[in-house]
Amino acid sequence: MSTCDPTRQTAIVLFNLGGPDNLASVEPFLVNLFSDREIIELPFGATLQPVLARLIARMRGPSVRRNYARIGGGSPQLRITRAQATALEERLNVGSNGTLPYRVFIAMRYSRPSAEDALQAIAAAGIRRIVTLTLFPHFSKATTGSSRRELDRVLAIPGWRQFEFDVTHIDSYPEDSGYLDAMAQTVTDAWNQIPSERQRRAVVLFSAHGLPRKFVDDGDPYVTHIQMTRWGILQRLGIDNRQVLAYQSRTGPVKWLGPGTEETLVDLGREGVTDVLVVPLSFVSDHIETLYEVDLLFADAARRAGITGYYRPKALNTNALFIRALARLVERHVDGEARSADTVSARTADGVALTGAAR
C-alpha cells in the first residue's frame, strides 16, 4: 500500500513546446505560437502582434495542415511527452517502497496541458515543491525562457499566490554526460547503417532548430549550447569525417541563424557527396521537425541533389539512457537544493548559538 505524503513529494514539471493534436487544432496552435514575442517580434509592436498572428495563422494554416496530414494528422509530441513523463516518474521512484517522492507533470507552451493545467494538477495532489525540467536541452529565451515566463505569469495570479509553491528550475543540459551518451548511442546506431565501404566519405550534418539572429546578438546562449552538444557527440563517436552545422524550421519575417539545413544538403549534393547522416539537435522527441522536415522534406531535397544515402538517428523519445539522464539531473538538482538548505540552516544555528554566547 502506498504511504504517500504530498508535503514530502516533489513535482517535476516537464517544459515542452506543444503541438496540434489534430488538423483542426493547427490554426489555434499557430496563433499561440506567433503571438509570443519571445519567439518572434512581429512589426508594429506588442499590441498588434495578436492580430498579425491570427493573420499569419490563417495564411499558413492550409500548408501546415497538409504537412501534419503527412505525418498522421497531428503532432505526436504530447503522446511522447506523456510516455517520457511516465518513464521518468517510474525511474525517479525506483526503490521508494511506495512513498513516491516524485510526481511528473507536463506544461506545454502553446497547447494543452498548459502551465496552469500543470499547477492545477499539482495543487490538487497537495504538492508544494516544484522543479521544472526543460525538454529543450539548449537554453534560449525563446523556448525554456518563454516557458518559465509563462509559469511565472500564472504564479503571479492572485488565486495562485496562496499556495506558496517552492519552485526551482533545471534550464539546460547541453554538456550533461548522460544526455550526450544517449545522443551518441542513437547517432552511432544510425552511423552503423551506412555501408562500411561508404562511411569514409559520409558527412555528418547536425541540424539544430532555427533561432532569430537577434536573440544571439542580444546574448542568448543557444548557439554556444548547440556547439557544446555537437562536440560532445563527436568526441564520443570517434570519427574524423567531415561534419557541418545548419539550422532548420526557420519561419517568419525575421533574420534567422544560418545556413539552412535544406540548402546545405543541396550544396553537399552538388559537391558530389553521396552519403549524409542528418543529426537533429534541439529535439528530444519526434514531431513535425523530425517526421516531416527531416524525414520527408529534406530527404526529398537530398535525393534530388544526388545524395543516395540519407540517414537519421532515432529520436530520443523514451530511450533508456535519456530517461536515466533526466532522472540524474533531477536527483542532483534536488540533492543540491537540500545541501544548500542544510548549509543555510547550519549557518543560522551557528549564528543563534553565537548570539546566545555573546549575551
Image: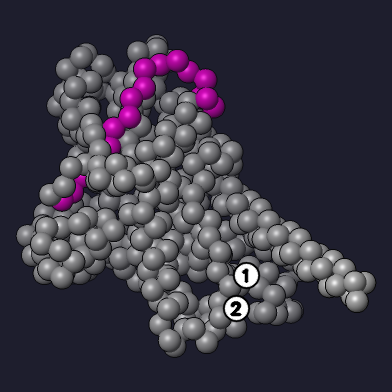
| Element carrying mark 2 | loop
* Residue that numbered label 2 is attached to: 127
Q: Is 188 displayed left or right of 49 in the figure?
A: right
Question: Would residue 302 be seen by someone viewing this image from the given angle?
Answer: no
Q: What residue type is labelled 2?
A: Ile
Tally the marks.
2
Label 1 vs 2, first from the N-terminus: 1
Q: Where is residue 271 in the image (x, y as percent from the top left)?
A: 20, 14
Closer to us: 62 or 341: 341
* Residue that numbered label 1 is attached to: 10
Quarter-of-image position of residue 116: bottom left
Question: Would residue 161 be seen by someone viewing this image from the given angle?
Answer: yes
Q: What residue type is labelled 1?
A: Thr
Q: Where is residue 356 in the image (x, y as percent from the top left)?
A: 89, 75
Q: Position of residue 115 (x, y in %)?
A: 41, 72
In reply to whether residue 238 is colored magenta, the answer given is yes
For image coordinates 45% across by 54% down, the residue present is 135
For image coordinates 43% across by 26% down, the residue present is 191
Mark 1 near mark 2, Cβ–Cβ under 8 Å?
A: yes
